[in-house]
Image (spheres, rainbow, N blue to C red):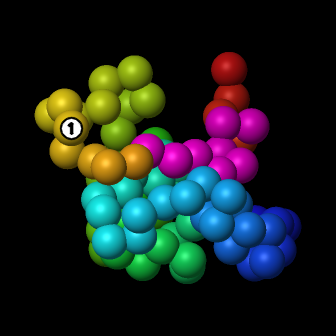
Amino acid sequence: MPYASKDRQEFIKRSNLDLDGRILDFGGMLSEELTNTVFGITSKRPFSNAVLIRPLLLPFKNSIFNAVISYHYFDLVSS
């Protein structure tokens, strides 16, 4: 990903995330910065903590995550 590490870290800071809470990174773009996060991804990637999902059919119960984030992901989804 061409985005600099500093930009990813600033995004996390601006998002005011509770890093001890449960976070779903929709797209898995912050895997290096948020190592304890669950990554919801739409194609197979070599993450040990990833869940393969369909964007419209999230396989999670209500209130299981404290936050759901997406960083530079939706611009990569083809229509």
Q: Amino acid at mark 1?
A: Ser
Seen at 66% across and 36% down, the residue is 74
Left or right for 32, reference 10: left
Seen at 30% across and 63% down, the residue is 21
Q: Residues within 10 Å of mark 1 (few under 14, many from 20)?
A: few
Magenta stretch containing residue 6, yes or no?
Answer: no
Tally the numbered discs: 1
Q: Quarter holding the N terminus?
A: bottom right
* Snapshot quadrant of residue 29: bottom right
Seen at 55% across and 79% down, the residue is 32
- Foreground pick, 59 / 24: 24
Left or right for 67, reference 62: right
Left or right for 44, reference 66: right
Residue 47's place in the image compared with 75, above or below, is below
Q: Quarter holding the C terminus?
A: top right
- Foreground pick, 62 / 31: 62
Left or right for 25, reference 2: left
Magenta stretch bounds: 68-75
* Snapshot quadrant of residue 9: bottom right
Q: In the rendering, at what x and y percent does residue 35 appear?
A: 42, 78
